[in-house]
Image (cartoon, rainbow, N blue to C red):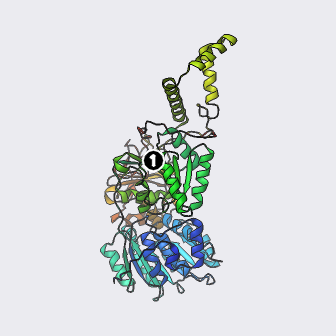
């Protein structure tokens, strides 16, 4: 069942044999080199081979199967040619959106996400119009097969994504039944982070002479690097980055973005805000890249905005901060990125910007690094004002100690005599003139934001546990952190089995060996009965009304064991003695 793949050095997607439309999109979105799972999966999938891939979430699996399958797709054929099975609706939506992006230059291509809780009538209409790719959860796919509203006669390939999660959520039998509906000559690609016996049995029964690929993730990061994340919400990322630059003591910083175009755009915007910044990307000549790195080393440049490839091997000791402005596509890229700081035993700081829809990648990064990434709040206007005042006072002290001020003292004495003004008032006027271009008082129009977890609703400290949000009741599920459950597992199981839309599911709080979840108070008895026998992470949910009379505080929904998110902003770094300052024309941050 094993097929060895010849090892070769791949430097670009052009080496992999993808179609011209796929290469055009790859160039536009700014992908520069394939990740290990992409490099090893794309060639055999292009050849029509079955594939068994072991790789963690966050290694770039979606592109690994979507790019080659779309390269082989016939856009003129309106019946389903690709079926992707995912354990949760969130993953189904994510995969469908990625495929829609990659198919930008495939005329007439349609992809349909199919999952429980979604309007069935709308799904039927879209199926009737014709789609070439379907991404869905096993339960809803089974519903369509039973109804006869989905036919797989023309199917060319089935992808089973996160097969071990399918097993934990009790969907593995559904997956096998769906595979039996597919034509016998279809191609099958199965991906799983782990390979339990049950998953291997499915692979042996349904995959024909598959290529086997195992990707080993790097699982360590430098102990001297502190890692934090900021939840992207409300404030623009550029404004957030500006606040961080204003308030933290930074010697030098590298900011990672996904595309070559973004390096130039962000660098120019930072320059316009008065920061010494330069782009670093694969389109630059080697000489220009070396010049930028040299400037960063000698202190004439403070910020480099780079892509992963351009920053490969970058070793500059004075880099105190790494900011993941765009979350990376895979966990290995994250580890490589933050390794640019904390060099030679020095302390480093890594900050990751995470949108709510990217929380899966955050979890994958924590799993791969085996470290908790704590949530941070942005510096407030008061923090920035205090920082500016501190730097201003430092400038005054340094000037008093290092400059001959006799001429200026006589000038002030003369002014005081002529205008009968006190020294204090004259000093205040001079201070105003000095800070006029960049006021010490930060009048930022963007309001300060509180620290928020991904579920920003109130924790309900004083609420009765059996009383959920308005219109909801609180249930106890017999699965918890000790079983490895994640919020996505809970949402997926309830959505698929009880036919409840995700937005109708309230707060989810995961404890050691159980979970509390708010569900509609109109939940039908048959839906509750169906959940009784539903398995998640190998555990029967057995929902029951949560016990009354407890005042135990609800925990934020996406906490993991050992995390400390939402506990306030970590203390400022000690930082370098030389303050990190702006240059040139300035605007308010």
Counting every numbered tag in the picture gives: 1
In this image, 481 relative to 42: left or right? left
In this image, 502 relative to 219: left or right? right
Count neighbours of disc 1 (C-alpha within 10 A) and say few if under 14, some if 14 to 19, many if 20 or more: many
- Write down the residue under mark 1: 321
Residue at (37, 86) in percent of width and height:
209
In the image, farthest residue toward the right: 418
Please state which of residues 330 and 560 is positioned toward the viewer in this rendering.
Answer: 330
Q: Visible in this render: residue 26? A: yes
Please state which of residues 540 and 203 is positioned toward the viewer in this rendering.
Answer: 203
Q: Position of residue 399 (x, y in %)?
A: 52, 26
Please state which of residues 463 and 35 is positioned toward the viewer in this rendering.
Answer: 35
Task: Using the rendered view, name the quadrant where residue 424 is placed.
Answer: top right
Residue at (58, 45) in percent of width and height:
239
In this image, 510 relative to 154: left or right? left
Q: Secondary structure at mark 1?
A: strand
Name the quadrant of the C terminus: top right
């Amino acid at each position: 069942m094993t097929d060895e793949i010849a090892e070769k050095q791949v430097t670009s997607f052009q080496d992999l044999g993808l179609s011209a439309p796929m290469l055009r999109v790859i160039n536009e979105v700014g992908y520069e080199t394939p990740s290990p799972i992409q490099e090893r999966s794309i060639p055999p999938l292009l050849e029509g081979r079955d594939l068994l891939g072991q790789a963690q979430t966050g290694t770039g699996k979606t592109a690994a199967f979507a790019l080659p399958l779309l390269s082989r797709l016939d856009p003129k054929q309106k019946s389903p040619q690709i079926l992707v099975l995912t354990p949760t609706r969130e993953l189904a939506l994510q995969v469908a959106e990625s495929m829609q992006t990659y198919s930008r230059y495939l005329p007439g291509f349609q992809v349909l996400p199919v999952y429980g809780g979604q309007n069935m009538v709308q799904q039927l209409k879209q199926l009737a119009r014709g789609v070439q790719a379907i991404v869905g959860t096993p339960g809803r796919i089974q519903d369509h097969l039973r109804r006869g509203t989905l036919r797989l006669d023309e199917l060319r390939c089935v992808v089973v994504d996160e097969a071990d999660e399918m097993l934990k959520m009790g969907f593995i039998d559904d997956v096998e039944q769906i595979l039996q509906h597919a034509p016998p000559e279809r191609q099958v690609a199965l991906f799983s982070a782990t390979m339990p016996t049950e998953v291997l049995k499915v692979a042996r029964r349904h995959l024909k002479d598959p290529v086997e690929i195992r990707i080993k993730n790097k699982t360590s990061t430098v102990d001297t690097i502190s890692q934090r994340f900021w939840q992207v919400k409300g404030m623009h990322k550029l404004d957030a980055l500006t606040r961080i630059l204003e308030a933290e003591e930074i010697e030098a910083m590298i900011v990672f973005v996904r595309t070559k175009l973004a390096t130039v755009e962000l660098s120019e915007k930072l320059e316009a805000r008065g920061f010494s910044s330069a782009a670093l990307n694969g389109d630059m000549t080697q000489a220009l890249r070396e010049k930028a790195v040299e400037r960063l080393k000698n202190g004439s440049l403070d910020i480099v905005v780079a892509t992963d490839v351009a920053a490969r091997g970058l070793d500059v000791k004075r880099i105190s901060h790494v900011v993941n402005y765009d979350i990376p596509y895979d966990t290995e890229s994250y580890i490589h990125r933050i390794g640019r700081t904390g060099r030679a035993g020095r302390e480093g700081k890594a900050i990751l910007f995470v949108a709510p829809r990217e929380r899966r990648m955050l979890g994958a990064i924590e799993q791969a690094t085996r470290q908790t990434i704590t949530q941070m709040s942005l510096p407030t206007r008061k923090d920035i004002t205090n920082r500016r005042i501190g730097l201003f006072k430092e400038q005054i002290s340094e000037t008093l100690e290092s400059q001959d001020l006799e001429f200026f003292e006589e000038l002030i004495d003369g002014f005081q005599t002529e205008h009968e003004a006190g020294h204090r008032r004259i000093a205040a006027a001079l201070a105003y003139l000095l800070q006029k271009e960049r006021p010490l008082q930060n009048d930022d129009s963007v309001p300060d934001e509180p620290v928020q977890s991904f579920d920003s609703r109130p924790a309900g400290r004083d609420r009765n546990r059996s009383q959920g949000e308005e219109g909801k009741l609180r249930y106890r599920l017999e699965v918890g952190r000790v079983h490895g459950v994640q919020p996505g597992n809970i949402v997926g199981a309830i959505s698929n089995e009880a036919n409840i839309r995700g937005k109708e599911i309230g707060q989810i709080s995961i404890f050691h060996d159980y979970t509390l979840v708010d569900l509609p108070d109109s939940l039908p008895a048959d839906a509750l009965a169906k959940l009784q026998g539903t398995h998640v992470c190998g555990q029967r949910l057995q929902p029951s009304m949560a016990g009354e009379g407890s005042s135990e505080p609800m925990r934020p929904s996406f906490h993991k064991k050992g995390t400390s998110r939402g506990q306030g902003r970590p203390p400022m770094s000690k930082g370098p003695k030389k303050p990190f300052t702006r240059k040139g024309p300035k605007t308010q941050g």
